[in-house]
Amino acid sequence: MLVPAVYGLVIRDHDGSRAFFYAALLGLILFTMLAVVLNGRRVPQSALGPLLALFSAFVFLPVYFAIPFVEALPTTRFINAYFEMVSALTTTGAKLFQDPGRLSDTLHLWRAQVGWMGGLLMWVAASAILAPLHLGGFEVTAQAEPGRRDTGEANRMTPIDPRKRVTRAMKALLPIYAGLTMLLWLLLLGGGDRPLTALCHAMSVMATSGISPVGGVENADIGVTGEAVMLLFMLFALSRLTFSKDTVTATQGGLRTDPEFRIGVFIVLAVPLLIFLRHFLGAYDVASMQSLSEAAYALWGAVFTVMSFLTTTGFVSEHWIDAQNWSGLNTPGLVLMGLALTGGGVATTAGGVKLLRVFALYVNGTREMERLVHPNSVSGAGAAGRRLQSNGAFIAWIFFMLFAISLAAIMLLLTLTGSNFEQALVLSVASLSTTGPLTQYAADVPIKLIELTPAAKAILCGAMVLGRLETLAIIALLTPDLWRA
């Protein structure tokens, strides 16, 4: 909180600076008191502890983060501030305040910073908490049941302290995460963006939060060059192998044989091409954009937007409207929701179902068709095939069913609060896939979240936490074996 406090002082936003400074002092006092109380107390080493701490962080930290938000914006209610902080920390990026001018630059920086910290938290938690428990997509590759500790580590005489594992992951990943953010910020600055906008967009791309102080990339005037730079950094959300090999998702072949990266690149190329070709296949009534340059801009707008929603970032290209006009799809909401549901790579900041689970189901489907011709053949050949355990597709299918049940349940609850079917569908997909900008671009008319009832906002907060941690992790918290560990 000291960062927005200092920034507010520099830009002469004294009310905002004072609110964040006092909140930082309050947090320091509370942290010191807890440290004194817990000093010397033996912490039990169990598999449940880190997972429960991660869940508590997404539920209770936004309460503390919302305090300076309310103080700096006294015209709003606490439930709205809490919603904004849950949305930022879970890297969802759903915004209640449609007009960027409603918030000061200090609050815009705070929202982007919270989203950035949430992305870092998921990077660290993926390798230090979820991977040992075979959750978060690792259940498809690990040789153990979801929610149980790594058997190899459990049989050691001296198991690794979860705190040491978190510290080790933080030391390894924080320099990479911060360095990439700084590099993207400098590149966007070179492209002509103002410092605050460039910094917020850099943090949002790395965290896949889609938070913007100007209402989106289309309003930043960075051009195709700036969008191309951002697209390159979105590649880090397609696969863990783009920045680390510290988990069981690693393969000897690198990105060349990584199924997540290959599927992601295929989707980014195939979907825009289909949107682009639709102009020639059926949308002849659209009498515009006949020049080659306009067609290229339309294709680029589709490529950038598809990549953004596949990684659950949610930024829209300034040429996305050209792509819509070219294809004749004024509101391709189903396309955007499908991309967000697919999601990015395992152990990245992206949400959604994850590409590795999609790959597991694809491999199982092709295997079943091969068995019709060769009933006695052997499967699992190749570097990519060896990444999946024998029942990986079964576990992936279970996750899909749990995801669908969660989606239906949230839609039902939202309809009970007064939302119509279309709104409930978009809101449910946006929260479970942690792709908040879907509320602005997936429906015919942008959904005004500020007009939702407090009950609906509370439901969406729970859905965003559920989408960030995933259903299997929540179920693991309820497993009696973990409580007895």
Image: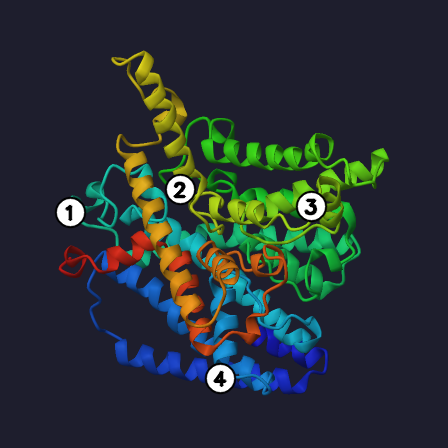
Residue at figure coordinates x 63%, y 77% from the top left: 6
Disc 2 and disc 1 in contact, CB within 8 angstroms:
no
Name the N-terminal-most of marks 2 and 1: 1
Q: CA distance from mark 1 to mark 4?
A: 43 Å
Name the secondary structure under disc 3.
Answer: helix
Q: Amino acid at mark 2?
A: Asp
Residue with the mark numbered 1: 157
Give the residue displayed 84% in from the left and 33% down from the top.
Answer: 292
Callout 3 amino acid = Val
- Which of the labelled discs sits on residue 25, or is there none? 4
Q: Nearer the viewer, mark 1 or mark 3?
A: 3
Question: For mark 3, what is the residue?
Answer: 229
Instruction: Evaluate if marks 2 and 3 touch, with contact meaning CB atoms under 8 Å apart.
Output: no
Query: Reading the chain from its start, which is encountered first: label 1 or label 3?
Result: 1
Residue on which disc 2 sits: 246
First in sequence, mark 4 or 3: give its number: 4
* Within-10-Å neighbours for mark 1: few <14, some 14–19, many 20+: few
Between the residue at mark 4 and the residue at mark 2, the CA separation in whole angstroms equals 36 Å
> In the rendered structure, are the residues bearing label 1 and label 4 in contact, judged by CB atoms less than 8 Å apart?
no
* Residue 236 visible in the shown view: yes
